[in-house]
Amino acid sequence: MDNEDLTASVWDDVLSPSSEPQYGPLSGSVVSPSVHSHFNNLSVEDHEEKEKEEDQAQSEPQMEFHQSQHLYEPQSSHNDPFSSTYYSDHHDSHDFNISREQISELKKDERKEHTNQLLSELTQGSEEGLLAGSGTVSPKQVTPSESLFNDKDSPLKVNKNIDAELLASPKGKVKLKNGQLFKAPRPRKFASKVNVKHLENKKSDPVVVEKNPLGPLGSESDDAKSGDKSSIISSNKAEILARQADAPLYEIQKKSEEDKLREEDPHDESLNQLEITVGDPMKVGDITTAHIVYAIRTKNKNPSTTSLPNTTEYVTVSRRYKDFRWIYHQLQNNHPGKIIPPPPTKQTYIGRFNENFIENRRLSLEKMLNKISNIPVLSNDPDFIMFLISEDFINESRERERLSGSGASQQNNDFLDNNGLNDDTSSSTGSLNSSSTISAPLIAGGGSGFMSSLFSMSTKIDEPDEYFSHKKQYIDELEYNLKQFYKAIELVGTQRLEMIGILDELSLTIDELASLEISKVTTELLSAFSEIQLKIKDNLDRINLQDQLTLGFTIEEYLRILGSIKFIFETRSKIYQQYYTFNQELLKKSLSLDKLSKKYKAQVDKINSLTFEVDKLKQKTAVYEKNFNTISDTIKSEIENFEFEKIEDFRNSVEIFIESSIESQKEAIELYETFYERQNLATV
Amino acid sequence: MASAMPYNPDDFENNNPFAEPTEQANGEDSSEDNEEEDNISRDSAGNPHNNDEHTNQQGKLTEAELRKLVPERFTEKYSINIRLHAIEKNKSGNPILKFDVAVKGLPRYRQTKYKDVRRTYNEVVKFNKYLTISNLEVFVPVIPSATTSYPPGGEDETKQLLLVWQEWFTRITSNPILVRDEEFVYFIENDFGYSVINTNRKTSVASGLVRKTLKQLALPYDPYEELAEFRPLIKAAYLSCQKLYKLFDRNSKTEKQLSIHIFDLSNKLSVLAQFENSHPGMRNMWEKLGKIVQIQSDLTLIESINEMGSLGDGFQCLANDFYQIKEALTNRHLIMRELTQAEAQTQTRHQNATRIKNKSSLDPIKVDEAIRSLEYATKAEESLNLQVKRISGEMLFERDEIINFTEKKLQKMLKQYTLNKVDYHRRNLKHLENIRLDIRIVDQKGGLSRLNRDNLTTLKHNLTQSQAASGDSWSSRTFRSLKKEEEERESRLEKEEEEEEERLKLAAEEGGADKNIVDAKSAASLLGVATF
């Protein structure tokens, strides 16, 4: 056995290098152009965007708003009273503003806040406004912490502008996107969004500029990411890259946001339609590092997408189980509130190379990837695409993880492994070291270590929305019931396995008795009977496996999905907790400010600083509130989806269960009837 | 008639000194020789040194000889017919067997017909033991245990016991040697209660430790090839049957456990159904599935019992029988060894006599004594020889009977098992097919049957039962075991009813004996009710 294994691994070693060169050029062509264009876009934007005419600047925001409208239209239908009241608040304040006016107004606010800003020149200012508009990002973005969901407001504001947007039909946008690789002036790829972010950051945060010298340092890591980066990178670009390296998670959030925009647009052809298969589990490595790698074959059925190489060929990469977990956590971090199809549970060390187990896991992994790819937001996630096509996964994943600050590889997988038993706050501690800014850990699943320690002290906060407490209870109960169900099925399975063993023995013993040849008739009868027993055994074995693969598999999968759901619930409650704390603080501070301003009008310094603090807190609270509302809405729609899918999945698996049971019964009947007939038992 | 070393007084007239060495040379395998001689029934007292030739002719008894050895086999004069017709409940494990007996041609019986003989199971077991001990030449069947794998006191158990005990009675009474056993008279004629009368007849073969030791010795030479081969066969069959019994027992226990687990599953499903109140379709599905699973659990439980009842008990019964046969064959070996010893003794006596005869000074007392002891030894040897021959001859008959019986029994067992299985799976299938529609109508999409096509809500679900009366839809077979079995059962019942009627008619013609019994019965039953 050992020898075989060794030779097998040797073969793997021999094979993998030979197969890699095949894909080498492919991947080069796959990754580099996009990255390249990405950077091209950067430079283009830096230098040319400024000189754009006003009308373009005008039309662009409109387009974006239009898109964002698409995005939020379906969601708004799910809004419950809570969130709608929230909207109305904002609505009131900005109700009559058309976008331009609003932008300039907000810009003024910004300026007031950041009087000591380095980038206060006019040109810069105009660019900033322009870009802020085009990025569907309202000026509130100034504070780094709230940049995630700020475009939420835009649909509401722009509602009145729909007529004006008729020009900017989705078609035009598609054009933009398709031509993006080649047309510099209209860069509206996801990369541009990143750019916008960078610029804004640069503008809003003076420290960034000072960080300029860090540029080359930051770009080091980018070299790893894009080997063929051109050498003509301007210092500006380097700076951007530095930012990128430092960038908090929300950048990726932005991307996904745009992906969302894209996919919600029904006419958008740039959606990925992926056909993914997981196969060829192979044992790799020596005794200590032995593991199974799975080959993932991906084919993009939609040729007009840009995120994937435009080939009709399959792209094959090999990933191990750990990597699937990585992408799971990465997606979880990228899309708070989304139910990410989870990977199968981890297996104990023993039995990892069991054939059944591997097959089961392969199936689960394939199902996971297919489910992900069926959710448009997720299937267009750059991390997911990287996962599907990257040749240098280890480094790239590390890079992405660092960028997003997700700590995906270190995430505590409790709920995955224990079928969602207790997912405590430690699941997010991985993000602690990844970023020092406040914003990153916020979205990375609920606060850095400091914050979580702070919250653990805080008292339980009442759930603001009854829907969630109900749902949470429902989910818990469902999980309990499904677990019971699963256990029962497992017990039946093991019992059946035992029976299979006994049947095997029975057949052998009957054969023994037959071979004694007590008489010709008995020998024939008994050997036929022994054969029947063997066939019945096979039948039982098959039906057992089938049951495990249909019902058992589905239940197990749903248990894992419930784990995911619990995770998003938790993320939500963490955000809420943060919002709550900031709100409390804000109240306190504003109270004292009131007192101060009433009583001691002389202490101008103190009042000023307090005002500043209150303002900051206000912003923070607003951001968290927004985040909280967004995630609540996402969760609601996700739960609804989940219910529908649950019905369909369980119905299907029960149907398969019934049908396969029927077939197995038929087979058994047939076996016995034949036996009865052939042995002339009717005449006995 | 056949003696191992024929005592021929002429031998002692012959003073040829060369005669002795020849005898001595033959001494070692004298037993063999003797037997051989007998086997060939003396007239063909061929060359004692040519063993090969002999083995060919060994083990064959001519019919004439058999007629002399086992005359019981060649008459039709005697018969006992026992018909078990009821099993009364008694203390657990000791029910009362009620049977009618018809005796034909046997002496010492006072009547030819006995009605409603009542014997407890333990009494029958004692009788069975006695028969085994006193009839060494017969493979006495062992009465099947009073406890079956069916639930105690149930209808199935009674049915099974009636069947197997009737079978046992038939086997006992169909054996001409057992029928002639005098104990049978007591067994049948005793009014109430029976205990073995001939208790003084102890087992004539070694038992206990002696037996164990003797079994360790090399087997005596067996001239009857069929019987020589039969013992290892039976032993292996015994072991296999025992193993099978254990396996079936384990299997049935596992299946029982499985049915418990399935029941558990059905409980879980019904809880899930109650919990699922948001979607009525889902709820319906879980409920129906729970019900089906529960039925499945019940069926599995029944199946586990049936399996054990048909095959497990059957193999147990066979194993017991085989064990008894094996013991009988061992007994035969022991008797054969005794014969060998007797022959050796005759040999030594013979030598002794010869030596004395050859002595120059003849002591007439010593000569007399030697000759007498030789005569005695010869007689003992002769009777043993006869016994061995009778046993062997009878066992040859019995062997065929056993093989036939085993064949029939196995067929019957497997038939019953198969029918049970078919019934089980058919029921299961029926129930499973019943809920197909419930699952398909969970939502508008209509499940997998729709193959993801849209707008097919109006399409009719093509869900017919696959087990139509005209045959199974999945196969072209029109034959159905269960149906046929039912028909047969019906016809058999009809026949039995007719027989019963005839019997009743005859009984009515015979006289009012029946009436009396009926009265007593009703009186007893009335009393029985009153005592409660």
Image (tube, coloured by chain):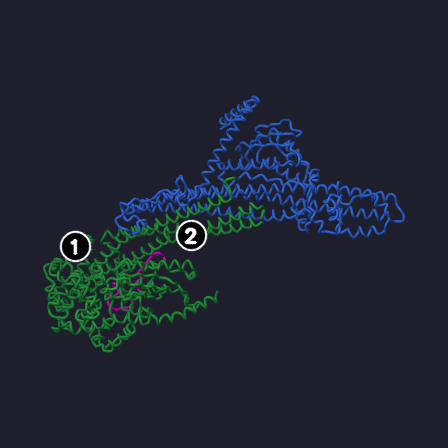
Chain colours: A green, B blue
* Picture quadrant of residue A406: bottom left
Query: Magenta residues?
Result: A418-443
Chain containing mark 1: A
Q: Is residue A628 above or below residue B381?
A: below
Of labels 2 and 1, earlier in sequence is: 1
- A338 on left or right of A81: right
Across and down, in percent, residue A6 comes to 45, 68
What label sits on residue A500 in the rendered view? none
Residue on which the image places disc 2: A542
Say whether residue A90 is magenta: no
- B289 on left or right of B457: right
Chain containing mark 2: A
Q: Is residue B254 above or below residue A229?
A: above
Residue A119 in view (yes/no): yes
Whether labels 2 and 1 share one chain = yes
Q: Is residue A51 above or below residue B424?
A: below
User: Relative to the observer, which residue lies in front, A367 or B270?
Assistant: A367
**Element type at marker 2?**
helix
Q: Amino acid at mark 1?
A: Thr
Across and down, in percent, residue A8 comes to 44, 67
Q: For the residue carrying disc 2, how many other residues have a C-alpha within 10 Å: few (<14), some (14-19), or many (20+)?
A: some
Across and down, in percent, residue A66 comes to 16, 61
Say whether residue A439 is magenta: yes
Alpha carbons under labels 2 and 1: distance apart: 57 Å
Q: Nearer the viewer, mark 2 or mark 1?
A: 2
Residue on which the image places disc 1: A85
User: Relative to the observer, which residue lies in front, B448 or B297?
Assistant: B448
Residue A245 in view (yes/no): no
* Picture quadrant of residue B98: top right
Across and down, in percent, residue A442 comes to 25, 63
